[in-house]
Amino acid sequence: MISFSQAVDIVMESDIPVIGSERISFTDSLNRILAGDVISDMDMPPFDKSSVDGFACRKEDLAYELEVLETVPAGVWPSKNITGGYCSRVMTGAPVPAGADCMIMVEDTEILPSGRIKFTGTLKKDNIALKGEDIRKGEVVIMAGTLIRPQHIATMAAVGHVSPLVSVKPAVAVISSGSELVEPGIVPGLSQIRNSNSRQLLAQIEQTGTKGNYYGIAGDDEDITYRIVSDAIAENDLVIITGGVSMGDFDFVPSVLERAGVRILFSSVAVQPGKPTTFGLHPEAVVFGLPGNPVSSFIQFEMLVKPLLFRMMNCNWKPLTLKLPMALRYVRRSADRMALIPVKITGEGTANPVDYHGSAHITAMNETDGIISMPAGVKIFEKGEIVSVRQI
């Protein structure tokens, strides 16, 4: 048995398949991983731009009545420069005429019977967004390795980067093991249970911007399991099989993996839940064997599989971690292994451990916002003690 930190190091330092890249439309790039820098093709703003609806003036003229030369709406270039005794009315976002060094807001002016304007306020700032103050032409605005979110799509639109280079999505296989399993649409018979693990894992995979390939249920037959696993390895970059990794008479997944040519790097981790988590490498794919209990498989995917999936796509992904006080005193019975504890973040900003009855109690995860880790040898977290909450 190895420590959980050793398991993380082995997974994240392992040789993994090389994933290529492709160009797609930026409108289809949400949740994809950028494989090349996004570079601006222009200065932003592209000209000195008014930040307010008002009048473009010279500061030295603000004590005098000013004659209005023209009105400049957004999208129109000024036809007149500002000289002594003159101003132009300029809308928000429109170019500031040459010669002006400030914009005064409409609400700080008085329109005189003559049609001239008089400044009645106090100039606290220039109200001009200067050319290139946000972005310079040729500047990297989004770095390769970024997980693309809506704000990145807006940035790509602004700089004309309409065909970003992104990492190809890894092909990920999901297999469930166990003759006791039936699909969710079937009413279980005696001694049967519905297969929730696969649907859970497929959804977790989709959250990474990837799409899983479901290979169904492998019953308790070693040859059938071997054929399904072999097909999954040949057709995918990463294979996840749940169940059959413990020490029971029908838990033959590790031996099937070895028969399929997988070099197993570990098969037992000092962590709760998730002790029988298995990890191995095949020349064509990375393989995980996760425990059959859904809470275990959920947590081990978040802690081990998800970071590797992002690494396969060359993503600079880091889980969001919050430092929060414990909502209550938490005591566990045994401290021989590191514990990964699902918690809910309360409205008061505390971490409240979810009450669950073991690693088969999947509905308890409905309230879970994050995971905290309790080191081996530690039995108690006191109320108010600061813990690191890894959000999920």
Image (cartoon, rainbow, N blue to C red):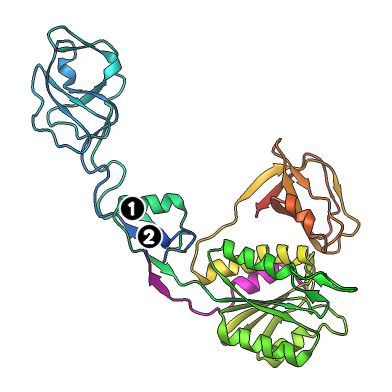
- Spatial distance from mark 1 to mark 2, Cα to Cα? 8 Å
Q: Nearer the viewer, residue 126 or 363?
A: 363
Q: Which mark is residue 130?
A: none
Q: Is residue 289 left or right of residue 284?
A: right
- Asked if the residue under mark 2 is in contact with the one under mark 1, i.e. CB atoms within 8 Å, the reply is yes
> Does residue 354 show up magenta in the picture?
no
- Mark 2 crowdedness (10 Å alpha carbons): few <14, some 14-19, many ≥20: many
User: Is residue 94 left or right of 227 when viewed as pictured?
Assistant: left
Determine which of the numbered discs, if any, sits on residue 26 in the image. 2
Against 354, residue 119 (above or below) is above
Q: Is residue 1 visible?
A: no
Part of the protein shown in magenta:
1-24
Does residue 149 appear left or right of residue 176 in this picture? left
What residue is disc 1 on? 157
Q: Position of residue 245 (x, y in %)?
A: 78, 78
Q: Name the foreground residue: 343 vs 69.
A: 69
Check the image and report above or below for 109 versus 391.
above
Which residue type carries mark 2?
A: Phe
Residue occupying the point 83% across, 50% down: 355
Residue 69 appears anywhere in the view: yes
Q: Is residue 18 left or right of residue 297?
A: left
7 is within the stretch colored magenta:
yes
Marks 1 and 2, the one that precedes in the sequence: 2
